[in-house]
Image: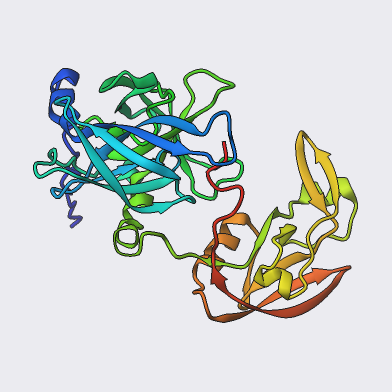
Amino acid sequence: MVVLLVLPAPVLAEPCTEPLRALYARVAPSVVSIQVTKIHKARPQARFETVVGSGVVVERDGQALTSAHVVDGAASVTVTLASGVKVGARVLGLDPVLDVALLRLDTATPPPPARLGESAALRVGDEVVVIGSPEGFEHSMSRGIVSGVNRRLPGLDQPMIQTDAAINPGNSGGPLLDRCGAVVGLATFLSEDARALGFAVPIDAIRAVLRELRERGRVVRPWLGIQGRAVTPALTGLLRLPLAPGYLVEVVYDGSPADRAGIRGGNLAVVIQGEEYLVGGDVLTAIGGHPVRTHEEYLARVNALRPGQTVKVTILRDGHPREVTLEVVERPRLPSDLAD
């Protein structure tokens, strides 16, 4: 006798169908407009700069998230609530790597906090909205879809969310919301070379550093002082150089652990298919005995380390492998952090 088992159909989450105007009315009170005054001592003719951004309250005590580039170097921070009331704020913590900052509003009656969602659940085509202050127009909402996920952009190690929802100057730090009104990202910048092309920092990455921002005021990350990219078959074939599979060391920061250990960066700039490479440096093939073949593997191996420990790395130089020992340090702020 053959017995057929009928398995229950998977239960799918009910899609949120709340009208957008109702979603806005529910979430907008948690969104704030931010006005920042910065003083540039090296600019005699333009010492004062005013920056406008957005933020979103995430704790009942008035803690709010915004973009680090909005409040970096602020002499004063003023926050405008949805009610129109203006209050002061201070920076609790700032991370130039993720471009996120944590503020505390100076008010006895802070706005209600927004709910944090899960950016890992986002899929291309999901509907999203952005609430913020584009060009200073406070509490504006735009609508769009998720255009891409896990977008890796030049100079950024954190994969980003791509959206066609309108993001303009002043939106930075404002929430990217899913259709249920949960915060799934922070609007961080737009592409000036294309329309309907904006990016947001995933909320999952922000949630992972919130405690450090709150308790330390910064995020402690391990650092070796190397910048590079994977050695691809195309790169090896085009250059006809003895490059082994691994991580091509393009830049070694002065005074870094890699610099002190004698690791060499590139010294010859070549352009291949529109991309610039620095070749002539070492190829890193392993960290702590674990192979490194891609940029993602390099980041994973480094992030598994901790400042203060020593680690052995294997490099290939002139076709010959060698092993060097590095002392891991805390990642400093780099000149490229929060660059335009």
Instruction: Note whether 299 is above or below 9 in the view shown.
Output: below
Q: Residue at x 57, y 41 (%)?
A: 339
185 or 289: nearer the viewer? 185
Instruction: Residue 244: give x, y in percent of width and height.
Output: 79, 63
Instruction: Residue 5: give x, y in percent of width and height.
Output: 18, 52
Q: Residue at x 54, y 41 (%)?
A: 41
Toward which corner of the image does residue 46 lie, by quadrant? top right
Q: Is residue 174 left or right of residue 248?
A: left
Instruction: Note whether 90 is above or below 297 in the view shown.
Output: above
User: How many numbered discs sit on the rendered protein?
Assistant: 0
Q: Residue at x 88, y 60 (%)?
A: 242
Residue 258 visible somewhere in the drawing: yes
Q: Is residue 137 left or right of residue 248?
A: left
86 or 126: nearer the viewer? 86
Q: Is residue 153 left or right of residue 18?
A: right
Q: Residue at x 59, y 54 (%)?
A: 334
Residue 72 visible somewhere in the drawing: no
Colouring of the image: rainbow
> In the current view of this chain or complex, which residue is farthest to the left?
109
285 or 23: nearer the viewer? 23
Instruction: Note whether 62 is above or below 45 in the view shown.
Output: below
* Quadrant housing the N terminus: bottom left
